[in-house]
Amino acid sequence: MKSRAGYAKALALICMSALLAAGGSLTVFAASKTISKVDIDVKIELEPGDDLPDLSYGSKGEGANVMVSDGAKYEIVEDPEWSSSVGSSGVKIGSTYTFKVILEAKDPDEYTFKGTYKSSNVKVSGGEFVSASRSGSDRLKVTIKTDPVEGTFEAPEEAEWSDTTLGLAKWDSVDRVDAYDITLYRGGSTVYKVKGYQGNKISFYPYMTSAGTYSFKVRSVAKNDSQKDYAKSSDWTDSDEIYIGKESVSDGSGKIDYNNQNSAGNNTTAQVGWIQQGDRWWYRYPDGSYQKNDWLLLNNQWFLFDADGWMLTDWQYKNNNWYYLNPVSDGNRGVMLTGWIQTNSGWYYLNPGPDGTVGAMYRNQWLDLNGKRYYLGDSGAMYEGWRQIGNDWYYFYPGSGELAVNTTIDTFYVDGNGIWRR
């Protein structure tokens, strides 16, 4: 006599045979898993003065510029491309350069990209994570910034006094150098030191208040504290000597505190329009005045300047609103952004107009866009997952932020307004 287990087994075989005989097939369905972390190795050596090299990709250990592990659930599918560019002088010491990497899930039926990817779950070795965006569920575009370029500055080749302007010191500019230290001497005694000067000539005459023989020395230096970690100062270059008699000495008037670099107006250039000093920008008008502490509209793009006249980037708070000014040197640095943006801390929506304040970050409010609904929290970040707004609970799909309506989320029903109903 067959056991009950035997009958059950026989019945299962009969059902399976019938299904196959009818031309059917057996399919095993499995929910795809999320690629929760991404790990990228960067091996790029940039030499001062060189162009940006072509980038290669491969698996770790293959000697490529950009690599991922063979065992990863994703792979690089296109040659990484530079987002940055360099001028005729090439790569600069202390500068960083951005490039984009396209990742693709190896088996999108089993593993997919979901949710938000930021510095907490995208590890970059040999570079720095900037941003990431998904294209569907099988592709992820990651923007990476190189480590600052290391090197030692070259020294100025010539340092001399002007033949036509008394006390005007000048020297040859050095490629890829934005700042100089200069020391003025009378005989063997130090008269005045200038640090981090951005230019290749300076008037020392107001400091020549005693008769004697004057000289100066100059060297190339880092333009800011962050660059000092990667750039070494050059050797000193000594000038020729000049004698100032009693009848020609200065009365000390017209002295400029060259060591105060906070003001953009301390630049003596005759250039107008956009002017770059190191990695900062300011905007000068033909009458010598400059834009400061306000917005400037140029070619339908908005820029914001601080009280000292420097163009601002990144998040800025102005007139009770937050704005995001492009921090990337991609040809649109400083431009006020609108619409959706993604940063390391999430997605934000900046008013594109025409209603309301253009560029202002949405906060504590609903957003209805293209037939979908979103909510921007107190920090301005887009809500994802289960969230309480007022007395009600809502569910926002992770990654997209879209409000769920008329559906069941993990056995919890949300109605046509997206409200969870018990």
Image (spheres, rainbow, N blue to C red):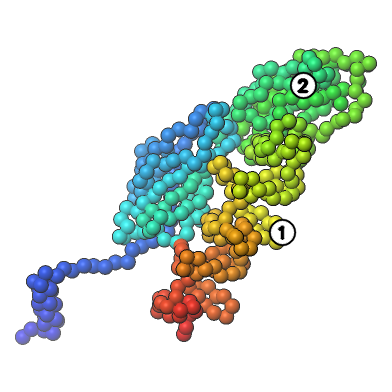
Q: Say which amino acid is labelled 1.
A: Asn
Badge 1 or badge 2: first in the primary sequence: 2
Residue 320 position (above or below residue 19): above
Direction left: furthest residue: 1
Q: What residue appears at the point 36 percent right and 38 percent down from the top-left corner?
A: 62
Q: Are marks 1 and 2 in contact (CB under 8 Å)?
A: no
Front-most of residues 32 and 284: 284
Q: Which residue is mark 1?
A: 319
List x then y, in percent, for residue 108. 32, 57
Q: What residue appears at the point 46 percent right and 79 percent down from the top-left corner?
A: 416
List x then y, in percent, for residue 187. 84, 17
Q: Which residue is mark 2?
A: 169
Q: Quadrant of residue 66?
A: top left
Q: Residues within 10 Å of mark 1 (few under 14, many from 20)?
A: few
Q: Residues within 10 Å of mark 2 (few under 14, many from 20)?
A: many
Q: CA distance from mark 1 to mark 2?
A: 44 Å
Residue 24 position (above or below residue 282): below
Q: What residue appears at the point 50 percent right and 51 percent down from the top-left corner?
A: 131
Confirm whether residue 35 shows in the render: no
Residue 15 position (above or below residue 135): below
